[in-house]
Structure formats: C-alpha cells, structure tokens
Amino acid sequence: MTLPLSSSVTTAHGPHGFLHSTGFVIARNLAVVLAVVFWLGLAFWVYKDARRRMRDPFLVFVATLVGLGLPFIGPIVYLLFRPSETLEDVRSRRIELRALEQQLARSRPSCPVCSSPVEPDYLACPVCMTMLRQACARCNAPLEPLWQMCPYCATPLEPSQVDLDAALAAEAKTIALVDDGIPLMPQAEPRVADA
Ligand SMILES: [Zn+2]
Ligand SMILES: [Zn+2]
C-alpha cells in the first residue's frame, strides 16, 4: 500500500517541486522585475524624448501613452513616427538663419553718413543727399572714389576729381560700419604732420 502512494507522491511532486523550488522562484521574480523596470524605463525614455521633440503637451501625452501602453513595442512604434528634429535643433537653426540674414543685411552697401541702404551705382544718397560717387565726365558711369580711370570708357580721371584722402576716409568709415571690431583709421593727425 505504501509503495504506490509514495510513487504517486513523487510523480506529483516532481514538476511541482521544480516550479516551487526557491531558485526558480527567485530567477522568475527577478526576470519579471527586470522586464517591468525595462518597460517603465523605456516608457520614461519615450516621455523624455517626446518632450524634446514636441511642443504640444497632448502629443507628448499620446506618445507616452503609446510607450507605456504597448510594452516594448510602443517605444519602437514611437521611434518610427517621432519628429526627426528636436526643438533645440529647430531653435538653433532659426538662430543661425537669423544671424546669416543680419550678416547679409550688414554687408549690403549703405550710406556712410545716414546708413540707409544704397545701390552700388548710386551717385548720391537719396536720403541725406551725400555725394557717394562721381559720374564719369565722358560716359556718365558711376565711379568708385578710389578709381583712377573709368573702367567703362577708359578715360583717366583728373587729379582734382580724385580726392584720395576723402575716399580713404569714406572707405575706412564703411569698413568700420561693416565690422565694429576694426577701429576707424586715424585721419587728422598724419595730415597735420605732413603739412
Ligand atoms: Zn545718406
Ligand atoms: Zn566713363
């Protein structure tokens, strides 16, 4: 009578005993805890990443819900649909663009007296009436102050027409306007020393 009982006990005890052995329970619990931690960690990462990429709090909420609601698959789905640029990227690109525009605006020719924008072929500033260039006596082309000869008709300019000192001073002023780092050239003192 005792033999079959003991055998039935061992057969019932075999797999059951393995499932309830402390080593297996600890390993299983550890795996479950790790899986849960990994799941929550991924969901938290989705939340943080969504906040870096989306301005709308509702979209961040939806992304977090996807990351949390579909364990391990949600973050992959989020990766497929998230915006490619972070808000920081968008901001720095906008700042860069604005700096470039400002640089372009500064390098555009402007009147040395009133700083209003002028075209390269203007003879005078239309705002403050400052004479910017001489017109060629022969072909009426606008001449740069430093030119010794008209490049359009090859007429040499008369020395009286070329005021080199004034031209250099104007040039220095324009450079100083374009780049504040370059100081204005000293103009008065050398001239006094020459005379
Ligand atoms: Zn002007
Ligand atoms: Zn000319």
Image: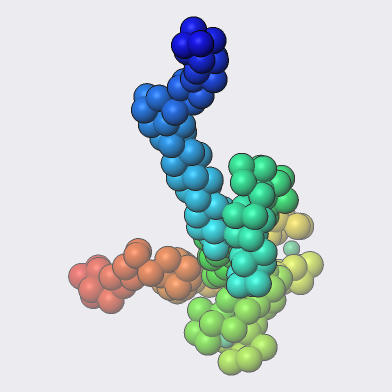
Please provide percent x and percent y for residue 156: 64, 58
Q: Residue 176's quadrant in the figure? A: bottom left
Q: In the shown orientation, is residue 139 left or right of residue 98? A: right
Please provide percent x and percent y for residue 18: 47, 20
Residues 161 and 146: in front is 146
| Ligand 2 sits in quadrant | bottom right
Q: In the shown orientation, is residue 87 left or right of residue 66? A: left
Q: Residue at x 28, y 70 (%)?
A: 186
Q: Residue extending furthest right?
A: 139
Q: Residue 129's quadrant in the figure? A: bottom right
Q: Residue at x 54, y 82 (%)?
A: 115
Q: Residue at x 44, y 41 (%)?
A: 33
Residues 36 and 73: in front is 36
Task: Say which quadrant the C terminus sits in.
Answer: bottom left
Q: In the shown orientation, is residue 77 left or right of residue 20? A: right
Q: Residue extending furthest left?
A: 193
Residues 74 and 189: in front is 74
Q: Is residue 47 above or below residue 140?
A: above
Please provide percent x and percent y for residue 31: 46, 33
Residues 181 and 132: in front is 181
Q: Residue at x 63, y 91 (%)?
A: 127
Q: How many marks?
A: 0
Q: Residue extending furthest top?
A: 3
Q: Is residue 99 visible?
A: yes
Q: Is residue 191 above or below residue 18?
A: below
Q: Is residue 49 visible?
A: no
Q: Residue extending furthest bottom?
A: 128
Please provide percent x and percent y for residue 89: 56, 57
Q: Is residue 139 above or below residue 3?
A: below
Color scheme of the displayed model? rainbow
